[in-house]
Image (spheres, helix red, strand yellow):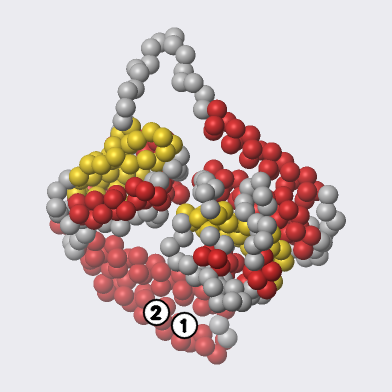
């Protein structure tokens, strides 16, 4: 690690400790002496260590070199983002570290959403194992690879994925650069020619989502103020069947209470209704962290706990995809409840567009639950 990097880490640690000292102003007056001693120690550290290091780096010209390095890094990041080819940088587990604008257009996934998630999650299930295996081989230094994959957004159009090893900067681990290129005949655009034919399937799905959101809004607006359980029951009735095979609604956050369970005919809905929501890891995580979860062919059978018979709910319900969404009116706001949706059997998995629609409806549900509640 260079002296400039060490100085940056020391400075970042100092800033973090200073923030902790600021938050310590609320301690009892009898303990302020200890806080003052810590503050004086930090000031002495700046005077004795950080400032001399800064002067030494400035005299040796390393500060200017670091500034030039930062300018170079900004230039390279800009080139990466503006590259016309769809490109993504992933680790050996296919987790996306960066994705350029062209890749977001091809996959239909925002870069901010994709970062930190496996790239295999945006592929059809049949291609995931092969892509993960080839990525790991490239990261181990076994040479570049290339294979055809299919995106969930458009599974009928194969995409050629070219994988090559890359060592970004001074990082200890090898990353993998993925270049995605649609295959097949591509007719060049001619001035004055008509654009591509509209995707009728996509338009139909979009219209269905609008109809669903309209039905949800109508159901919520007809409820009386303060009817929190009624909000969950009405929302479950709207979503059941037309959108999801199972709809499970839990009220609260710290103390979860299962309010509604709707499933397919002859399904063990009563067993799921009797289940303690606190025994469902997905529900607990959504209630505590306020983060939604979209899973296709869930790998952990116990992610939604077990029913009264001891069987995993996801296995017994034959769940092929699920959405678990916290009900909150705003980002970082209080969680009013958790909504979980299952699709089973041969039904198509939840798409990212559908997950976005459910996210919007969840905010509307949270607003309806808060309506008429004093102090909320």
Total numbered labels = 2
Residue 267 sits in quarter: bottom right
- The quarter in which the N terminus is drawn is bottom left
Q: Which residue ends up furthest to the right in the rendered image?
A: 224
Q: Which residue ends up furthest to the front in the rendered image?
A: 266
Q: Position of residue 275 (x, y in %)?
A: 64, 73
Q: Between marks 1 and 2, how big is the CA–CA gap? A: 9 Å
Q: Give the numbered dot on residue 35.
A: 1
Q: Give the numbered dot on residue 139.
A: none
Q: Give the numbered dot on residue 40.
A: 2
The answer to whether residue 170 is visible is no
Q: From the viewer's perspective, is residue 281 above or below residue 158?
A: below
**Residue at 55% from the left image edge and 82% from the top image edge:** 27
The answer to whether residue 362 is visible is yes
Q: Position of residue 90 (x, y in %)?
A: 30, 51
- The quarter in which the C terminus is drawn is bottom right
Q: Position of residue 166 (x, y in %)?
A: 20, 49
Residue 159 sits in quarter: top left
Name the element at disc 1: helix
Q: Position of residue 321 (x, y in %)?
A: 51, 54
- Residue 73 shown left or right of residue 363 in the figure: left
**Residue at 44% from the left image edge and 9% from the top image edge:** 192
Neighbor class of circle 2 (other Cα within 10 Å; few <14, some 14-19, many 20+) is few
């Amino acid at each position: 690690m260079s002296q400039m990097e060490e100085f940056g880490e020391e400075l970042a640690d100092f800033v973090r400790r200073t923030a902790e000292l600021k938050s310590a102003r609320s301690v009892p007056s009898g303990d302020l002496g200890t806080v003052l001693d810590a503050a004086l120690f930090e000031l002495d550290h700046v005077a004795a260590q950080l400032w001399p290091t800064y002067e030494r780096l400035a005299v040796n010209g390393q500060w200017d070199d670091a500034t030039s390095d930062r300018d170079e890094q900004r230039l390279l990041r800009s080139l990466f983002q503006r590259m016309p080819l769809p490109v993504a940088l992933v680790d050996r587990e296919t987790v996306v570290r960066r994705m350029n604008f062209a890749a977001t257009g091809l996959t239909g996934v925002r870069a901010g959403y994709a970062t930190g998630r496996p790239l295999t999650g945006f592929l059809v299930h049949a291609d995931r194992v092969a892509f993960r295996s080839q990525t790991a081989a490239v990261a181990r230094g076994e040479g570049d690879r290339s294979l055809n994959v299919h995106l969930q957004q458009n599974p009928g159009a194969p995409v050629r994925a070219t994988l090559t090893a890359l060592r970004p900067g001074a990082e200890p681990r090898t990353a993998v650069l993925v270049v995605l290129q649609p295959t097949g005949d591509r007719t060049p655009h001619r001035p004055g020619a008509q654009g591509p034919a509209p995707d009728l399937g996509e338009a139909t799905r979009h219209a269905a989502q609008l109809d669903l959101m309209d039905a949800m809004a109508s159901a919520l607006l007809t409820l009386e103020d303060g009817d929190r359980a009624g909000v969950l029951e009405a929302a479950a009735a709207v979503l059941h069947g037309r959108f999801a095979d199972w709809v499970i609604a839990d009220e609260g956050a710290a103390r979860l209470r299962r309010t509604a369970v709707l499933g397919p005919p002859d399904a063990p809905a009563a067993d799921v209704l009797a289940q303690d929501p606190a025994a469902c890891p997905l529900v607990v995580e959504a209630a505590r962290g306020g983060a939604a979860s979209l899973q296709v062919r869930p790998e952990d059978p116990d992610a939604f706990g077990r029913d009264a018979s001891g069987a995993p709910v996801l296995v017994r319900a034959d769940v092929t995809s699920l959405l678990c969404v916290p009900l909150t009116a705003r980002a970082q706001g209080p969680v009013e409840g958790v909504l979980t949706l299952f699709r089973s059997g041969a039904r198509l998995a939840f798409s990212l567009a559908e997950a976005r629609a459910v996210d919007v409806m969840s905010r509307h549900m949270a607003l309806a639950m808060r309506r008429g509640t004093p102090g909320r």
